[in-house]
Image (cartoon, rainbow, N blue to C red):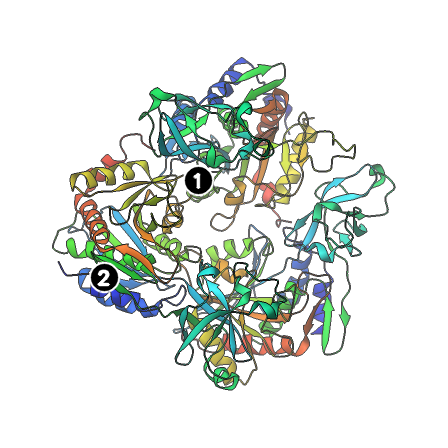
Amino acid sequence: MEDITPFLLSLLSKPGISGYEESVSEIIADRLRPLVDELTISPLRSLHGLRKAATNERRPTLMIAAHMDAIGLMVKTVNHGFLTITTVGGIDPRVLPGQLVTVHGKKDLPGLVQLMPDRLLNNETASKAPTKNQLFVDTGLTQKELADLVKPGDLISFAQPPFEMTGGYIAGHSLDNRASVAALTLCLEEIKNYNLDCNVVAAATVQEELHGIGAATSTFSVRPDLAFAVDVTFAKGPGSNDYRTFSLGEGPAIGLGANNHPALTQKMTALAEELDIPYFIEAMPTSSGTDGMAMQITANGIPTQVLSMSLRYMHTSVEMTSLKDIARTGRLLARFITDLNPDSFSKLFEEKTL
Amino acid sequence: MKTLLKKLTETASPSGYESAIREVIRAEISSLSTNIKVDALGNLIVTMGKKTDNGLRVMIAAHMDEIGVIVSHVEQTGLVRFSNLGTILPQYLAGSRVVFLNGTRGVINHDLPDDLHKIMPLNKHFIDVGATSGKDCPLKIGDVGVFDRSFVDLGKRVSAKSMDDRVACAVMIETMKIIKNSPHELVFVFSTQEEVQCKGATTAAYEIEPDLGIAVDVTPSLDILGIKMQVDLGKGPAIKVRDMGMMSDPRVVSWMESTAKKNKIAYQLEVLDVGTTDAKAMQISKAGLPSGALSIPCRYVHSPSEVVDMDDVQATVNLLSALLNNPISL
Amino acid sequence: MSPQTKQVLNVGKAQLDLLEELTNANGVSGNEIEIREIIRKKVAPFVDEINVDGMGNLLVIKHAKKPNAIKVMLDAHMDEVGFMIVEEDGDGLYEFEHVGGGDERQFVSKPVSVGSQKLPGVIGSKPIHLASEDEMNAVISQQGMRIDLGPAGKGKAKRGDYAAYATKFIRSGDAIFAKALDNRLGCATLIELLKTAPEHVELLAAFTVQEEIGLRGAKVAAYDFYPQLAIAVDSTPAFDFERPDGNENTQYNCKLGGGPAIYIADRGTLSDPRLIRFLTEVAEENKINYQYRQPGGGGTDAGALHLTRGGVPSVSVSVPGRYAHTAVMLARISDWQDTLNLLQQALEALTPEILSGDRA
């Protein structure tokens, strides 16, 4: 199988910020096109790649969503040679001071995020956690130069390029959720030559970081019989050690809880055991925080399962995850698909597990 | 347009109870279309035109509800406790007057605070309708009311309560009057319950199934409650790039900008850190649709005296009609 | 309205036994299987269609026996607030998360029942003898609490197991003490109404899941049913106490003994005024004790129901209950009986004309 790393690195080098995903969706579309029967774009520009069942009979449809958008920043005002900013998605203001960014104006400009000095804020902010309103971006340009090139609404992305680390790990700013896009791609590659007994829609969804609207609208139009959301979850690391965290590189996390259909959780677990893939059970008592939340309550309700890869430093410019886990997740998804036929589909829901 | 605006803003219709404003608006537009209906949530839906080959079904929404109050308890003293319909900011309450749909008028004030500098929460406020006891109070639990404030002409600018969003309703009405040979099917929705999370637009969009959604609303301008805005009065309509509920579709933003430029209409770009509009509800309807919003800059939003610039209002009519009267290529 | 066909419903032994069985059963949001199966068995003898959808909602239809029937949806959520085990700590101790709204000051010193086997456990706390003065002044944080199955409970529970309070139903005169009166009262009400449904109504009853974590089941149930109107039946808190400072209590929400609470507005829904008027008329005509729930916060499944597709006129009616989202709730049998009768009379009086004319 092709090495997914170059593809992943190219994804991680693009902004593709929520609402403005073209820069990544083009790359993903090119990669998916040879792996699917039909590639379509939703009205909100999610990508839907359809692998049809090898029959004309009506077959169950499985939809797998991996969101392709990433968090970022947006220009709010252009004043006095500086840019004030607003966040797109959940960015912790505390990770921003000193961050090199790219301002996507009429052309891409380098910028630096910094803090208004405390002495100019009456020292009220001294030693306190930075807030969004204290931050600004310095491009080094004068107001006149800036006003020609940048306007309110222009996007700002982390300039941090991705890189491989020793031992099969990778770091970059949007492994959330491009790691899942890579896993989904590996899955499609693995099933490429199979005759499928069910239909599969691989969806690279938009705007998950903003209210999951890509998943909601894509699921409404596809109306699958089963819905999977592939996303990232928290790896154990400094300051992150409780039940919500999982050892990095030791397998994907299978969701358990309200957003997950118990029959699907059981099935995924059984398949992981069969394939000898190490895995974790991720307790999701109320929300999964993923596209799965929107998918499950679409139309008249869809059995849903969340599958996640653990990742350190989520929503920073140096997120880190395991390439092995990406491959494992792809393989597990592929196995579920090749295993799925009308019989196994109805068996899934025979036993009263819900 | 000032006369229309006065009529609209002086009508009392809080979220959930929009029949009065619906009738006022219906009278204004009834001659413009034969396809007028009211749906399950009370939205007034007016369809004009037919979709031509390259045309789109466009849903344009301006909400007709305003923020208001709802009686939660009549005290033995005759003072009335209330809850909010939509976002009511406590700092605008003490000394304000309200009028209820049953005609009762009252004044708002609040319990004695420990600290005179502190702003009291809603549940520490009450409405005095002049009753001497609970028994002779003309209000009961569930009665609804709005700020009682008349329209005032300040010249270039005007002030009234419920500019949010009656000024957009006025813009829509004026636009509807000058729609000519549009290649599109235009569905104008005077929506309900926007102030309580865009309810009307949600159900309206579901039935209408538009290809494109545009909300017309107000946007805060200048320094309001500590939120620094780039948008100001007198600089033209604001094309919304994003707010807290949605990112406008970039294609819609580009289309709005190029149309404004082509028609030499001065405009602003809006990046808003608080609140949202009906565009959010339209964007996520069913399989999703590209959506955006045109905003009329407004000062003191959600206060009893909001202020807009009449040149901005006219420019918004000009821009909206230019957008709808011409082909759209996203 | 013709007097001779009026059903008057009584809460007798059968109804109390039903409520007891429903409240003693477990069904924490996301794990409603036990309560759903009990309800399914109860309704099966007198309904026409029963389905369970992809989220676990129990969707029940009792067809009208007359033509041009009005399609009414009644909704009652089956789920209750509770706990999920998230990590084993050793020695029979288990870390947990709370599911649904709840004040952590209410968790402590309670028995719980864990997992599908309903293993007995406790949530204890550090003895007062061993607590420092600082600790005594601080809230016991959920982080430090554990569900304890006893030392022999080691390995008996696992991540993802659900736990509910182990409260047992008690009756005392007109009062009922039980867990999950929110919303087994609603479920019991729907079950009773299904038995006596009038012939001119197409009755669509949804026993929904996951209300306590975001009205999630109701949204899809209503999409499926798409009724002409919907009534959510729930339980709402009564904060009807004398204020310690002697001032008038202006924030009671509703009152025990005040009868069914009709919702005008809550945080999620502005009830359709036509339905508020209709229910009021029915109550007045039949001399049924009723009250209006104070407008303001809170919410019911109606928050999802009324936004379904092109919109569904909706209203909520609740049985007053004290101490919602805690181990033991309190309600009055007379309030429940009045709620049953209000809804029964409402169904009998329902005609499509009620929705003619615009909403407000």
Q: Name which quarter of the figure residue C328 lies in.
A: top right
Q: Nearer the viewer, residue C265 or A257?
A: A257
User: Which residue is depicted at the point 77% across and 49% down?
Assistant: B102
Residue B272 visible in the shown view: no
Q: Mark 1 and mark 2, same subunit?
A: no
Q: Position of residue B289 (x, y in %)?
A: 42, 63
B69 relative position to C162: left or right: right
Q: Is residue B312 above or below residue C174?
A: below
User: Which residue is depicted at the point 19% across and 38% down?
Assistant: A273
Q: Position of residue B64 (x, y in %)?
A: 63, 60
Dot 1 amino acid type:
Gly
Q: Nearer the viewer, residue B305 or B94?
A: B94
Residue C319 visible in the shown view: yes
SS for tag 1? Answer: helix
Q: Nearer the viewer, residue B181 or C85?
A: C85
Q: Nearer the viewer, residue B191 or A133?
A: A133
Q: Determine which residue is flagged by label 1.
A: C217
- Crowding at mark 2 (Cα within 10 Å: few <14, some 14-19, many 20+): some
Q: Determine which residue is flagged by label 2.
A: A38
Q: Name which quarter of the figure residue A171 lies in.
A: bottom left
As drawn, the label of residue A199 is none
Dot 2 amino acid type:
Glu
User: Which residue is depicted at the point 46% across and 37% down?
Assistant: C143
- Cα distance between the residues tagged 1 and 2: 33 Å
A34 relative position to C305: left or right: left
Q: Quadrant of the N terminus of chain C?
A: top right
Q: Is residue A223 above or below residue B253?
A: above
| Subunit that carries the residue with mark 1 | C
Q: Is residue B62 above or below residue A261?
A: below
A50 relative position to B41: left or right: left
SS for tag 2? Answer: strand
